[in-house]
Image (cartoon, grey):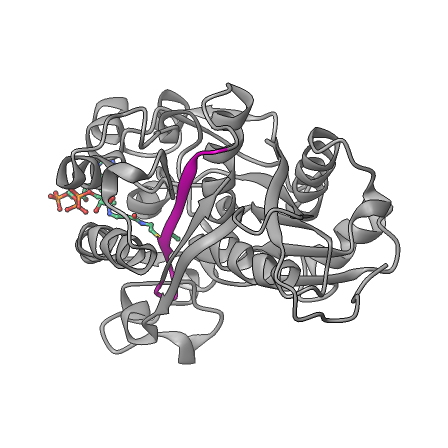
Amino acid sequence: MSGHARTSVRVGVEIAGSGACLPSRRLTNNDLVSMMDTSDEWIVQRTGIRERRVYDPKVEGTADLAIGAARAAIADAGMKPTDIDLVIVGTMTPDAPTPGVASVVAARIGAGHVGAMDVNGACCGFVFSLNVAHDMINSGGYKSIVVIGADTITRFCDFTTAGRNVAVLFGDAAAAIVLRVNQDPSIGLLAQAMHSDGEGARNLFVPGRELDFPPNVEYAPEKIHRIYMDGQAVFKFAVGTFPKLIEQTLEKAGLAADDVDHYVCHQSNYRILNSARERFGLSPEKLSVNIDRYGNTVGASVPLVFDELRKSGRIHPGQKVMFLAFGAGLTWGSSLWQL
Ligand code: ACO
């Protein structure tokens, strides 16, 4: 049942399961070489990416991937779709303006007439959704929420030489977790942060019409529905934001960097992740990288890393995990959990 009565008793929130769904089509750097003027060496050196998955718009979309991820996460939690009382999808690429991806997911997994909503925070969509979902359970309103990150961003990429600075970076995917009420109030969110800077969007945006072009970018009809990115400006923003966000979140929780077992980070560029590792002296075990296999999968990126860590037994109850993302909007945010 959706929308239980609120109570003043605070409860714990556990991550009960996780799952992922990837398109089957694999695109390696060498495949890209046949489509545009680029090289495996350039892509690997600048980004760490070796291959990515790309959806086939003729047979699948964001909702299909989100459904696959939701089903896998619910099964992993040992639950049934009818146990879920709210579906939240972090996405910037719904298949259509309406219905929202979450509504499609709720219906097609058989969750019934439960609440369903999409959160557009670009690469932060999942982390923002996680923070919202936690508090919905913690305040007594809901018992089990499936939180999904799902994007088919490659539809906004230009796979020719003109778009090579962007197209090589991205891939499509979905991944999900199930949050469930737990009677131990010490389990759940320890601290979180959510930020945005709409002015910074001039360096990273997808225009839908001529009016969307900021003064720094010249309008051209072929740029509509294509990602515009000033790579160096975004790189600077990310390298500067990551450490501040980690420090801010640790401070809120009264923890030191080493107290956190895993930093589950948005995968946008290996060099950005590595600079955070170096800044805080984190081992590769504490800050995992899978960008080499998937590229930047936008909202799916953070839960995809989490699912890999969980399935391989590296993440388990008792640990502290910080989820971190930054992206278009601009947006940046964190979610620090006691598992
Ligand atoms: N293959 C070969 N050459 C390329 C390619 C390519 N795919 N793309 C660009 N180049 C060329 C450029 O044309 C340029 O050539 P020039 O020197 O002759 O003009 C040269 O390579 C250097 O280009 P830069 O853009 O300066 O390269 P940089 O070292 O900055 O690396 C990159 C580019 C990888 C995009 C980097 O800036 C980056 O990672 N930025 C952050 C991107 C990011 O994280 N975006 C997404 C975050 S938000 C979200 O996830 C929605």
- Asked if residue 161 is positioned above or below residue 196 in the image, the reply reads above
Query: Where, by quadrant of the figure, is residue 44 drawn?
Result: top left
* Residue positioned 55% across, 58% down in the render: 129
- Note whether residue 148 is visible: no
In terms of depth relative to the viewer, which is nearer, 263 or 64?
Answer: 263
117 horizontally vs 235: left or right: right
Q: Which residues are magenta?
A: 318-331
* Residue positioned 49% across, 59% down in the render: 128
- Asked if residue 145 is positioned above or below residue 32 in the image, the reply reads below
Query: Where, by quadrant of the figure, is residue 65 drawn?
Result: top right
* Residue positioned 45% across, 64% down in the render: 224
The image position of residue 191, as x and y in percent, is 40, 57
The image position of residue 126, as x and y in percent, is 52, 52
Residue 133 highlighted magenta (yes or no): no
* Residue positioned 63% across, 61% down in the render: 118
* Ligand 1 falls in quadrant: top left
In terms of depth relative to the viewer, which is nearer, 224 or 166?
Answer: 166
66 horizontally vs 172: left or right: right
238 horizontally vs 91: left or right: left
Predominant secondary structure, magenta span: strand
